[in-house]
Image (spheres, grey):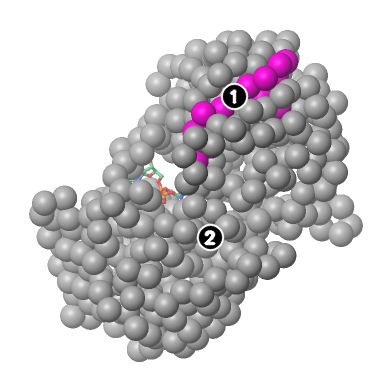
Amino acid sequence: MEQGRDRFRVTGGRRLTGTVRISGAKNAVLPILAAAVLCPEEVVIRGVPAIRDVQVMLTILRRLGVRVREEAGLDGLTLVLDPSGLSTAEVHEELTREMRSSIFLMGPLLGRVGWVRMAYPGGCAIGPRPIDLHLRGLQELGAHLEEKGGYIEATATRLRGREIYLDFPSVGATENLMMAAVLAEGTTVIRGAAREPEIVDLQSFLCAMGARVRGAGLDVIRIEGVRRLHGAEHTVAPDRIEAGTFMAAVAAAGGDVKLENVIAEHVEAPAAKLREMGVWVEEEADGSLRVRSRGGLQASDVKTLPYPGFPTDLQPQFMAVAAAAMGTSVITETIFENRFRVAEELRRMGAQIKVEGRTAVVKGVPRLSGAPVTAPALREGMALVIAGLAADGVTEVCGAHHVDRGYERLEEKLRGLGAEILRV
Ligand code: EPZ
C-alpha cells in the first residue's frame, strides 16, 4: 500500500449519474480460493475483483505451495491456480492477523492433507469474532484439535461425515465445514446452515470440481464425500454488498444510476428498504438495476439479519443515508456486537446518532457538513465516503486502505458517475 495516499478527499453536493459495473463478490471469491486447495489439478477462477483481501489470500496460497497466475481482463482478474504442488499446511500469524477469514482454509487443508497449523485469527473492529462453531464442527467431523502458543493445530487421518448442527447460521463456519466434508468418508449434513448467495457460489465451484454438495441457499446442506476432485473453471458471482453500497450512495447523493452485473434478487432487502425511504429501484429489461433519488428521503427502521434479511455489511452505509433523511430511523444490529463505530465519525459531520448497545437511533438532519473523519473498518469507511458525497463541503476520509480491502477501483467508479473524489 502506498504510504501517504491513504485518504479520500470527497467534495459533496454532486448528483450521481451514469452506469457502473459491479465487480465479483469478495465474500464469494475468498472461500472459493480456499476451496481450490482441495483440488490436485489446475483450476481457473474468472471475474475476480482486484482487491486487497484477494491479494492476501493469494499470498497465503503461494506460501502453501500453490502456483498462482493472474491475468487482468475487462471483467476482473482471471486466476489460474495449480494446487498440485501443495507443500505445507501451516499458515503464519502475520497472514491470519491480516485477514481473519483465512480461518476457512482449515477445512480444505484438513481435507486435502489431513493436517493444518494456523495462528488464531485476530478479532477486528466489529467484535471479537470467535471461531467456536468452526472448531466444534471440525471436531465432529473427526479432527483432533490442539491450541498452543496462539496457534491451532488440527489433524485427521480421514475426516468422517456426520450430522452437524450450527447454533447460529455462521457464514464462515458453514463454508469451512462444507469444504472439510467434500473429501470426508461418507455423508455430512449441515443443519442450521447460513443461506447467503456466496455459499451457493461456493457450492457450484465445489460441484464443478466433482464434489457432491446440495442444498446451499437453504438451511440444510448435504455433502457426500468423494475420493478426489478434478480441475474446473468458475466465474465468481456479482458482489451484492458492493451493489447495495452504490445503491446507498445514489440514495444519499441523489441521482440516476444503472448498476450492471447485479443479481436483483440478492439485493431485495436493501432495495425494499430504500424504496420505503423514497428511492426508486427497478430491474431493467437488460438485467441491470436502475436506482433514482431526488434526495429528501424519509427515515426508515432497519434490523440486520442473516440472509435473506438486511445484510449487516450494508448497515453502516444505511446509517449514513439515514443521517440526512427526514425523521428518525432506528437501526438494530443483530449480527455483530460492535458495529456502530462509524456513528462517532458521522457525528463529526453533524449527524445526530444515539447508540445504546445493539440499537442506534438516528435523527435525520437537513444536511451533513464535510469534516475530517477516520474509517474504523471496511464498510464503515464506505459509509463515510457516502456521507461525504451527500454533505456540504469537503470530507477527508482517513483509512482508504480499509476500503481497498473490499472495493475495486472505488474512486474511479465514483468519478465515472460524476462524484468529486480524489485519493490524497
Ligand atoms: C462473513 O464473515 C463475511 N466475511 C462478513 O463480511 C459478514 O459480515 C458476515 O459473514 C455476516 O454476513 C466473509 O465472508 C469473508 P459469521 P464471518 O461467521 O463468516 C459469530 C465484510 O465486510 N460467530 O456469519 O466471519 C460472529 O462473532 C465482512 O465483507 C460465532 O460466534 O461471519 C459474528 O457475531 C465483515 N462463532 C456472527 O457469528 C463462530 O464460530 C456472524 O459471523 C463464528 C461466528
* Position in image of residue 174 (x %, y %): 40, 59
Q: Image point 63% across, 67% down: which residue? A: 72
- Quarter the C terminus occupies: top right
Q: Is residue 26 above or below residue 348?
A: below
Q: Nearer the viewer, residue 321 or 367?
A: 367
Q: Quadrant of residue 208?
A: bottom right
Q: Is residue 374 visible?
A: yes
Tag 1 residue: 396
Determine if residue 175 is in view: no
Number of marks: 2
| Residue at image coords 42%, 57% | 56
Residue 64 magenta-highlighted? no
Q: Is residue 395 magenta?
A: yes
Q: Classify residue 118 as left or right of residue 48.
A: left
Q: Looking at the picture, which amino acid does disc 1 mark?
A: Glu
**Image: magenta residue range:** 388-401
Residue in view at x 23 percent, y 80 percent: 158
| Residue 66 higher or lower than 4, as above or below | below
How many neighbours does mark 2 have within 10 angstroms: few (below 14), some (14-19), or many (20 or more)? many
According to the picture, the residue beneath numbered tag 2 turns out to be 28
> Residue 26: which quarter of the image?
bottom right
The label on residue 288 is none
Look at the numbered disc 1 and give the secondary structure of its residue.
strand
Q: Going by the image, does 78 lie left or right of 125?
A: right
Q: Amino acid at mark 2?
A: Ala
